[in-house]
Image: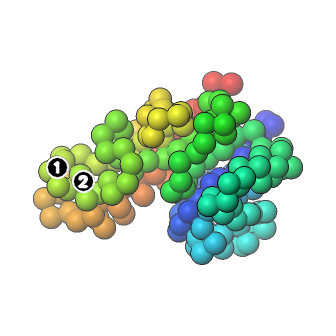
Amino acid sequence: MVKKNTCVFISGQGSNLKNLIMRSRDDSFPINIRLIISNNKKAYGINYAKKFKIPYIFIDTSYLNYENKVFLNLKKYKISFICLAGYMKIISSNLIRNFNKKIINVHPSLLPKFKGLNTFSRMLKNKEIKGGCTVHYVDEKLDSGRPIVQKSFFIKINDNKFDLKKKTQKLEYTAFPEAIIKIFRNY
């Protein structure tokens, strides 16, 4: 199997990144993580890049031409697939067009419900019965791309947003790799 050179975009803790790195070490897993991009210099996930000796770059998205740096690095590392793992920035139309159906995101809700931020607070306020995650293709509308994999759990009456986050992340660790396998099984 020829693995797809993949870039993972992160902004924070990088727990999904760590999970994908571990999975990518398996010969039968279809991606090879060749680059990590963060828009946050202090993202803890950068430590996983260092630990596993994966090239990483910081992108200051406040600069007008930051996207040029993104494209240069994607080209340099021959990236053909992108995973957004807790990347807290909207991806540009230009990047989406250039990587058509080759950018996926993991979102901490059962889309189309609760797109955007503050998902867990909004779920609790809305008295939702179920929580979960969705791995979906990225398109030009926020959290609106076609779902690839969804996983769910029942919300308990005394769950708080930290409980929901923990339960959701546990599902993300299986949903994200499952979605990647599903995508490349169809290629």
Marks 2 and 1, how far apart at CA: 6 Å
Seen at 67% across and 39% down, the residue is 95
Looking at the rendered structure, the kind of residue marked 2 is Arg
Q: Which one is in front, 100 or 153?
A: 100
Q: Position of residue 129 (x, y in %)?
A: 18, 46
Image-quadrant location for residue 30: top right
Image side of residue 103 versus residue 58, left or right? left
The spot of residue 85 in percent (x, y) is 55, 54
Residue at left offset 57%, top offset 40% = 104
Reading the image, the residue beneath label 2 is 122
x 82%, y 49%: residue: 72
Task: Please say whether residue 26 is visible from this viewpoint.
Answer: no
Q: Would you say residue 165 is visible in this rendering?
A: yes
Q: How is the image coloured?
A: rainbow
Tell me whether circle 2 and circle 1 mark residues in contact (CB < 8 Å): yes
- Residue 45, x across and y down, in percent: 60, 68
Q: Is residue 49 above or below residue 4?
A: below
